[in-house]
Amino acid sequence: MEFEIEKVLPNGLGRVGTIKTAHGEIKTPAFMAVGTRGYVRFISPQELHMLGAQAMLSNGYHLRRQAPEIAKAGGLANISAAFWAGAEATAEHAAREARNDGPERRVAQEAAGYLPGSESWQGPTLTDSGGFQVMSLGSGLGKVVSMEKERHVTNTAHKERLAHVSEDGVSFIDPFDGQPDFIGPEESMQIQCQIGADIHMAFDELTSLADTYEYNIEAMARTERWAERSLREHIKHRDDLGYRQNLYGVLQGGRWEDLRRQTAQTLGKMNVDGIEFDGFGLGGAFLKEDLGEILRWCNEELPMNKPRHLLGLSHPDDILIGAEMGADTFDCVAPMREARHGKIYTREGNINLRKYSDAGEPLDHDCDCATCKAGWTRGSLRALWRSGDIEKKAKYYNLASIHNLRFIVRLTEEIRVAMLEGCFDAYKHDFLTKYYTNADLC
């Protein structure tokens, strides 16, 4: 993997660049579509390309059972239609889908023809380690958006947790089949190297806002030890599928400046037999209003010549602040998930389709997505969404998901242009002023 920086903002952190992988280039800043199980729900790979998506992020935890078969197929970018058709037919996979989305949504997807595997995503891919998933099973993890709410955050009682951390890794009970399981740094690397994404994440321990400073010190030190083990194991398998797979170290440290700077320095210099991390993941639980400062602390310490991925955020203010403070790529399932629940993104703030039963106006007056170009209005899209017909509802999921994902992808495209043209500050001010005047911030 190569990372070329084309321009840096005057603050010395934000930048425009290009990440070159075995399966293509990513022009940064960029938003990655989330395809948890190797496909983006309700959007075909062709539609992903058409709406400007440059890369797809999948989940090591959710794909761990299928990893050996994915390796046989040549990796995540080469998964065959036959493989996914078979995987979807299994009782276990069907049960997982039903629990996650409800049987109606599952049937709707089938009826619309958007089963995974009709095509495969051929572009760059990234997998996360699964650390968030196994930790969140029983630790009360999550982000809060204000200090007032933080006072009410508590962790699940230890005896009630489904996940338990040790120096070896995380032991947990799989919520789908009730069986005990275990993932540590070595297991995570083996799984991810079988899945074969272009970029992987080191295994880390995610703390919660309810955890103390003292526990964050302990967890951060463990994450750093896991990072070294991840790097050592990854080196053994990174070329197994015939192309170079790359590894990002993941920064934790909560909301404390000394911990964030310390771990950035440690991971930035970490190497095993002369081999270092190829980039870095910026993670952790923190207050929304602290995002800019936390990114500044981390990115002032990290090597300038390596890419950085901000995990799990997609609101426009988060992406604008992230890009300004040195994050290169982003991911979050929210654009598609919120679309399925009737929330539509517009330049003047989010709208809820429940309020637009007879509206003939466009979803967004300034949108170039395929849904808007085809003439779908707020009222006509709402009619599909509220319909009891599963095929119509499936059509809605497709159209609304395309619109919301294009909205966020286009935002990163415009940020890139604004940075290159030297007008980022003005673009940021104008966008946020217009968007958050009436935005639904839920």
Image: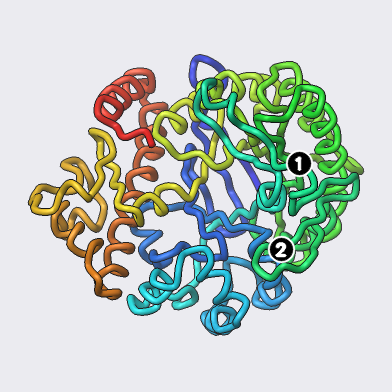
Mark 1 element type: loop
Comparing labels 2 and 1, the label whose residue is closer to the camera? 2
Per the rendering, the mark at residue 138 is none
Q: Position of residue 68 (x, y in %)?
A: 73, 74
Residue drawn at (16%, 42%) of the image? 365
Bin the neighbour count of mark 2 within 10 Å (Cα to Cα): few under 14, some 14-19, many 20 and up: some
What residue sits right under mark 1 in the picture? 205
Q: Is residue 159 above or below residue 269?
A: below
Q: Is residue 425 above or below residue 237?
A: above
Q: In terms of depth relative to the viewer, which is nearer, 152 or 426? A: 152
Q: Position of residue 371 (x, y in %)?
A: 23, 57
Residue drawn at (25%, 40%) of the image? 346
Q: In terms of depth relative to the viewer, which is nearer, 123 or 71? A: 71
Per the rendering, the mark at residue 174 is 2
Sequence-wise, which precedes: disc 2 or disc 1?
A: 2
Is residue 420 rendered to the left or right of residue 300? Answer: left
Q: Is residue 340 above or below residue 350?
A: below
Task: Check disc 1 and give the amino acid type.
Answer: Glu
Is residue 216 rendered to the left or right of residue 146? Answer: right
